[in-house]
Amino acid sequence: MERTGTTRRRALMVTGAVAAAAALTGCASGDTPARPTAPGPVSADTALRRRSTAASAALLARYDAVLIAHPGLAARLAPLRAEVARHVKALAPAGASGPAGPSPAASAAASPSASAVSSPAPVPGDARTAVEELAAAEQRAADAHTVALSGARPEYARLLASVAAAGAVHVYLLTEGAVA
């Protein structure tokens, strides 16, 4: 028999996480209690979706940075980048806003320079090395999505598995193709 809904273990985990967060932010400076920044606790599903979206958004930013540094790779990387942009949108929590929501993904998809600004790692001057590092970023994102499978609801787990598989294909395409 398959369980649906909230289990006691999940409820205790969420309650424990909320209590720990409250304890950590209880007194930010001296005797003045800190004010909460969010309207309420975030569900485990929403937190998982935000982490998954952030992993794909970071990958999208990496694609943008490589494309800006090496515009000659556009024909090769544009289809992969477009897929990653779709992954960001698909993984995002419904109605999300903020750093993990659809708004940054939409703006990043519209303008490569918008998401490249947040990319902390510099892009190598050599196109081959840049693509190798991009493949490593794809692998890290795919690994993150695979790890997240165990905590996801079945329908979201299927999406994560598909995105992780697509990332593995991207790694293959990036590492097996010749770079001009």
Image: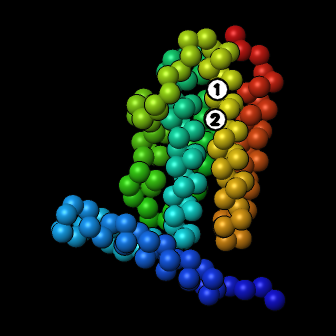
> What residue do we see at 69% from left, 30% from top?
135
- What whole-number distance in Å separates the C-alpha atoms at marks 1 and 2? 6 Å
Task: Determine the residue positioned at 45% across, 46% down.
Answer: 106
User: Where 166 falls versus 42 (above or below)?
Assistant: above
Residue at point 51% right, 64% down? 47
The answer to which image quadrant residue 124 occupies is: top right
Residue 133, labelled with which disc? 1
Q: Quadrant of residue 177?
A: top right
As shown in the figure, which amino acid type bears the numbered disc 1?
A: Glu
The image quadrant that residue 42 belongs to is bottom left
| Picture quarter with the N terminus | bottom right
| 56 over 31 or under it: above or below | above
Mark 2, other Cα within 10 Å: few <14 / some 14–19 / many ≥20:
many
* Residue 54 placement (x, y as % from top left): 52, 49
Check disc 1 and report its element: helix, strand or loop.
helix
Say few, some or many: other residues with alpha carbon within 10 Å of mark 1 (under 14 / 14 to 19 / 20 or more): some
In the displayed structure image, the side of residue 40 where residue 119 appears, left or right: right
Q: Which amino acid does label 2 sit on?
A: Ala
- The answer to which of 110 and 149 lies nearer the viewer is 149
Would residue 124 be visible to someone looking at this image?
A: yes
Do residues under tags 1 and 2 come within 8 Å of each other at their CB atoms?
A: yes
| Residue pointed to by mark 2 | 137
Number of numbered tags placed on the structure image: 2
**Vertical arrangement, residue 147 with respect to residue 114, above or below:** below
Q: Residue furthest front?
A: 30
Front residue of this view, candidates 100 and 77 = 100
